[in-house]
Image: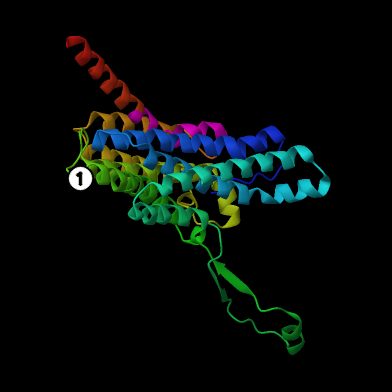
Amino acid sequence: MSTTIAQPLSPQRLYEVLIGEVLSTSLSTLAITLFISQSTWGVIDWRPILILFTADYIGFGFDHYLDNRPILLRARAAGEADIVTVFWCARFALTSAAILLAVALILIPLSTWLITATLLVPALLWDTPLFYWRQPAVQLSEKAKGETEEPQSGFAIKRIPGMKPVIVGLICGCGYYAVIRSVVAALYPNGPVMRSWDPIQLVIWSTINWTCISTLADVRDFADDRVSGVPMIPVLLESVYKTRVLLTIVHVLMMLAFFNNPYIVLNTLYTIGLVWIMDDKSPRFIYRLNTHSQTPVAATYGLVHAYRWLNSSNTI
């Protein structure tokens, strides 16, 4: 996913890219993790919620920061204090999130450390060359061989075809529940206090849904990714339209599989609508609806259970 914008950015727009968009994505994580905790265990523990919120902020924020770091270097050279200040604020926010994450990690079981690391490391290493290999040799003259450095190529997770939505789906769908369960299960060894959603159903739906969310987000950057040769699914299909059709088919199949769950059915209809509303020419802020496409499920679930709780309180 590309977050770098070629044309000069105003400090306000840069602040939106480095902090606003990252915070918006993390708030989506906050909503869905609260929902997972309450619906599968009947309790809300602040530690796994804080871990997932801050880890998500660090993962996305670090990626956005590195993507736009050339702007910081140019701003320092040109003495543009406003731009440099925005990057300082972004670093401060990332540092604050890291401190909060460390505080929460101190108070949790070791198993949660391992799960959190599994979720965070791929995000931090997303565009980092993990190793290099030599490119195939080209026939050169003896003089050219002496003057030319041997070319190398680097391997990064980002360059694995179609890998990004798979990673996002596994992290958000399976990983969120795994972190919450590892903490809450230690407090309640006898099982959930209350369970209104089947965890298996929740994990399957959430994993597939987040995979689709990530794929639709790549539609936004279709033109840039195609030029850069980043093998996202829209680029592999060579078409925004084909990507929409594929996402629609996946959503319909999921809706049929979970037709007895009104939350999933209604949310799937909503996300299919987003698929056909958004394209590679849609404004960036519109894609926040895609990032928050699971938030309505969490909000509706919360309102329904708040209504039931109020009614039960009034009858006592």
Question: Which residue is located at x 35 percent, y 26 percent?
Answer: 299
Residue 3 in percent (x, y) is at 59, 45
Q: Which is the main secondary structure of the residues drawn in magenta?
A: helix
Residue receiving disc 1: 189
In front of the other: 253 or 303? 303
When the figure is inspected, residue 230 is found, relative to residue 192, above or below; the finding is below
Whether residue 38 is visible: yes
Residue 226 in percent (x, y) is at 56, 53
Q: Which residues are magenta?
A: 281-298
In front of the other: 156 or 113? 113
Report the side of 44 relative to 127 (left or right): left
Does the magenta portion include 102? no
Quarter in which the C terminus is drawn: top left
Q: Residues within 10 Å of mark 1 (few under 14, many from 20)?
A: few
When the figure is inspected, residue 192 is found, relative to residue 137, above or below; the finding is above
Question: Which residue is located at x 39 percent, y 49 percent?
Answer: 171
Residue 28 in percent (x, y) is at 43, 35
